[in-house]
Image (cartoon, grey):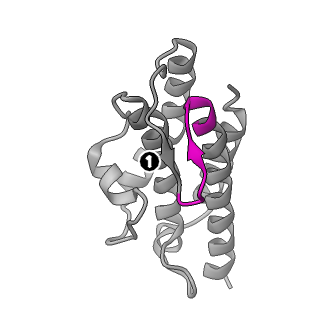
Amino acid sequence: MNISPTIKTRENFISLVNDMTIDELNEIPKGFNNNIAWNFGHVIVTQQIICYKLSGQEMLVPDTLVEKYRKGTKPESPITSKELEELKVLALSTLESFKNDLLAGSFATFTEYTTSFGVTLKNISEAVEFNAIHEGMHLGYAMAQRKAVRA
């Protein structure tokens, strides 16, 4: 399984975030129901849920982040600089661990799951493929939000 597209998307997300102020990251632009900070946290948490949790593995992110960024949530409070730094570290460290766990064969079992896209994930390979698409979509949202915040 190739997770290189996901790594590149995360690197691009980090570059986008690094180019913005904390106020810009927290702003919810007109026409959106979330912000760039939420989209960044959301992709990290979602990958953990669809790859680790659905495989019966322990997730590599704290439950507090899962509760804040999982599907169905929205920004309830501004992200702090400290939390942003934590997300930037997790963005790449979780993928490095994931790559190692894939090589170790840690994802032999998988609980079938139908995404909000209507795609049913039946195994870790399908989860990796779907995750790359999901993360690309949220990076696109974040890029549109940057344009709206800076308009």
For residue 54, above or below residue 46: above
Task: Magenta stretch: give its range.
Answer: 116-127
Residue 111, position in %: x, y? 43, 35
Q: Is residue 100 left or right of residue 83?
A: right
Quadrant for the N terminus in the image: top right
For residue 40, above or below residue 59: below
For residue 55, above or below residue 145: above
Q: In this view, does 63 lie to the left or right of 41?
A: left
Residue 135, position in %: x, y? 62, 51
- Name the residue carrying label 1: 45
Q: Which of 1 and 10 is in front in this view?
A: 1
Residue at (46% x, 71% y) in the render:
26
Whether residue 81 is in magenta: the answer is no
Q: In this view, does 102 lie to the left or right of 4?
A: left
Amino acid identity at mark 1: Val
Q: Is residue 5 left or right of residue 120?
A: right
Whether residue 123 is in magenta: the answer is yes
